[in-house]
Structure formats: structure tokens, C-alpha cells
Image (tube, rainbow, N blue to C red):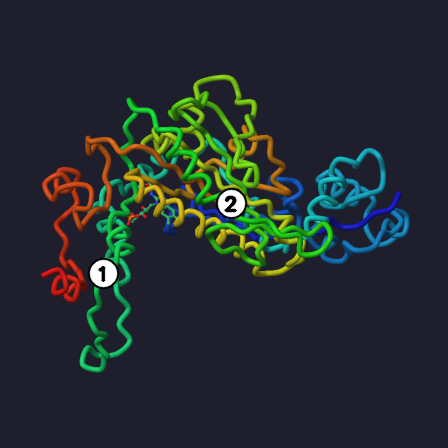
Amino acid sequence: MQIRRCSALLIEPRESVAFDLDSLLAGGNGLSANIELLALAPHLLSEVAISTVEADALSIIGATSWTPFDALAEKFDAALLHALLQKGLLISDDERHAENRERDEKLRAANWHPHSAVSHYFGRWKGVTSGESTDRAGYKSSAELAERLGASPPHVHARVPAEQRITLPETANTSMDELLAQRVTCRNFDTTRQLPLATFSRLLWRVFGAQAAVEMVKDHILIKRTSPSGGGLHPTEAYLLVQRVEGITPGLYHYHPIDHALEPLDAPDGDLHALANTFVAAQNYYADAHVQVVLVSRFERTFWKYRNHSKAYRVCLLDAGHLSQTLYISATEFGLGAFITAAMNEVDVEQALGLDPLLESPVAICGFGIRSSEFATIEFDPQQAIWSAEQSATVGIPAATTQNSNSQLSKESDS
Ligand SMILES: Cc1cc2nc3c(=O)[nH]c(=O)nc-3n(C[C@H](O)[C@H](O)[C@H](O)COP(=O)(O)O)c2cc1C
């Protein structure tokens, strides 16, 4: 049997602090700290506790070339090697360890930078309800937030005294400024109305559609979207959870950007609204959206060019951010509300959509739909683009301290 180490591995000395009566009785602070070593290897999808002896062995055994088991057993205890094989941190060419080997090879073939792979995989959630974690942290309202955390870092970072600032001229608003001023993250969707099919179709086409496709060289096609993309590779796929669109059966879909078509997917059994709620970690106001758009990054597409690159994962995240803003602005133009969240249960989403997280995984969830006329959940609208000052006050938003319009010239030219 030939052995090597798994290809991506970080070892974390994790400290946990617990109440300790003995320490208290001995006049101490009543706390005891414990450090355990955890192996974070993304091909395993969950962290593994290891001993210091195992950590020593893992820091010596290489990941690139195979070594016969017997040769390693001269240096390390055979039982230790077997334990590490069992844990999946050592890889072998033996059939018994085929599953871990295949996953490790898949991770390596996808050209992940190891730090990014660890950061992504171990940041994923399953079955988390974000509201409960906020409750546990003890800050549901802004007042509780300030009480628990103290003052926030300043809202503006001034680098020179006011008199040294070079004030820029006021300029005229254009229709783009008017549109941007209307963009307010929506947490109040109308669950009684259907979104018109034409609006849905135009929105998807504008944000996610391939406006053109170019075969740069044989078998390397780039698509053009209305948003920029690192390397022009557009790794972000749009998966849709549709609840209320005229003529579209509620369910899960993948959007095909060249055919401008929906690809129906099998939805898990059960209530679609409940699934939408699970996706967004029980932020139920987002579960009400007519359409949720799961932005799934096909990492291997970007990593094909930027191999084992420390910036490549960041590029994928930025990609999703750009698409989200185009979605927000487009929805706003059509008089709709839109949102984005990173508080999502990636593992549940992957299972529902049939994604292998070593290759493709959600990086954000957006959504859009018809706004409700009722202001039940807080929105940040200090310019009263959607809600009146009185409505904002009812959900606890104070009046704005500053209203920058910078629209002097536009006012003059209007007159
Ligand atoms: C990356 C990102 C993640 C966000 N996540 C959440 C979220 O989990 N829940 C939520 O209610 N809003 C979320 N938001 C929306 C922000 O709360 C919102 O943008 C902010 O309050 C400012 O309001 P505005 O978008 O109306 O200007 C997120 C926004 C961004 C850009």
C-alpha cells in the first residue's frame, strides 16, 4: 500500500473556555481553558480531532508523492498510520480508502488554494436559524447592540482636519441617481400577488443572461454579461426557487444563460416556503420573496485559470456581489424589491440543488418580488424612497441626521 498526505490541510489549535468550579473554589476566575488540535481538511467536510503525535506525522509526510506504507512504518508507529488513514488525513491507493482518495483528488483537480478551501468549507451552515443566534448573542435591537458592544467604529473615517478637505463641486442628478436613490433592501414582500412573467423574464435576462458568447480559442468560450467578471469567466450560476411567478410552476430551477430558459430540478418533498426559509437561515421575511436566486459559484471554472491562487476565491465572491447589485438596480427599475444575504444554510442548499461542494457551492442568496404595502419588517430607508418617516419610526428607525442631496444644479436646471 502506498501512502501520502491529503492535499489541503490546516491544523488549528482551538481553545475552549468552560466554567470550572475547582478553579473558583481555589480562588481563581472559575474558568478553565482547554486546547485541542483540529485537522481542517476540506475533502472530509468536517473537522477531525488529532493528537500532537498525529500532527507531527502529518507535518512530515508529503502530499505530492507516494511512499510505501512499510517505509513509513519504519519511522512512525503502524497503528498511528492506520489511525490517520481511518481519519482520512492520510490517503492510500488501497480500495478500502477509495472514497477519501477520490474526494481528495477532486479537490486537488479543482485547483483550490488550500486556505480558501478551508475558509469556504468550514464556514458553511446546515440547519442554522440566524434569528436564534442573534437572540442568543443578546442584541435584537440597535439599543441592545450598543449596550452589548459599545460604540461602533466611526461611520466616517476622516484622515485630515475639515479645513484641509477639498470640497468637490455639486453636480446635477441624472436618472441613474434617481434610480439608485430608490434602491432599498426589501424585507416586506406581497405574498398575495403573482409576479408578471414578462418582468421575471426581463430581470433574469438582464442580470444573468449571456448577452454574447465568444469562442476565444477552441473549447474556451467566454460569455458576456451586464456585470463584470474576474478573467471574464463568469463562474456564478443562478439557481431559482420560484414561489409566485405567473405561468411558472413553483419549484426549483437552474437558469440557462444562453438559451434564456429555466431548467426544472427535482425539489425535495415538502413545503417550498419552508425550504426557502431553510435556505435563508430562517429569515422568514426573505422566504416570502416571489423568487430567491441562489448565486452558486462554479469554483473550478475560475480556478481553471487562477490555479491554487490566493485571490481566486475572492474573485468568485466579488463576482456574486456584482451580479447582486445589477439585480437590485434592475428590480428597482421595475418597481420591485430585492435583497441579498450571506446568512444561508449552504449545506441544505447544496443538498436540495444536488451540488458537490468541492466543485460548486452557494456564495450568496438574492431575491426579488413585489413589495408589500405593509411595513412589518424593518428596512433602512432614511430618504423615504419607499416608506414615510412615520412608517420608519414605527419599526424603530430614527429620522436621518444628514440628508445629502448634492442636487443643487439639478434643482436649478429644473427651474
Ligand atoms: C453581503 C451582504 C449581506 C447581507 N446580509 C443580510 C442578511 O443576512 N439579512 C438581512 O436582513 N440583510 C442583509 N443584507 C442587507 C443589508 O442589511 C442592507 O444592505 C443594509 O442594511 C443597508 O440597507 P440598504 O440595502 O437598503 O441600503 C446584506 C447585504 C449585503 C451587501
Residue at image location 26% in from the left, 65% down from the top = 156
Q: Badge 2: few (under 14), some or many (20 or more) residues near its Cα, within 10 Å? A: few
Q: Is residue 30 above or below residue 150?
A: above
Residue 196, image x, y percentages: 35, 29
Q: Closer to the observer: label 1 or label 2?
A: 1
Residue 304, image x, y percentages: 67, 53
Name of the residue lying farthest toward the top:
270
Residue 166, image x, y percentages: 23, 79
Residue indicated by mark 1: 173
Question: What is the quadrant of the C terminus in the image?
Answer: bottom left
Q: Secondary structure at mark 1?
A: loop
Asked if residue 17 can be seen in this view, the reply is yes
Residue at image location 38% in from the left, 24% down from the top = 246
Name of the residue lying farthest toward the bottom:
164
On the picture, is 231 further left or further right than 320? Answer: right
Q: Is residue 292 above or below residue 228?
A: above
The amino acid type, in three-letter code, at marker 1 is: Asn
Question: What is the quadrant of the N terminus in the image?
Answer: top right
The amino acid type, in three-letter code, at marker 2 is: Gly
Instruction: Examine the image and state in which quarter residue 201 appears.
Output: top left
Q: CA distance from mark 1 to mark 2?
A: 41 Å
Asked if residue 10 can be seen in this view, the reply is no
Q: Badge 1: few (under 14), some or many (20 or more) residues near its Cα, within 10 Å? A: some
Residue indicated by mark 2: 123
On the picture, is 298 further left or further right than 172? Answer: right
Residue 97, image x, y percentages: 79, 36
Label whose residue precedes the other's in the sequence (1 or 2): 2
Is 217 or 327 nearer to us in this picture? Answer: 217
Classify mark 2 as within 8 Å of ligand 1 or not, answering yes or no.
no
Instruction: Examine the image and state in which quarter residue 135 appears.
Output: top left
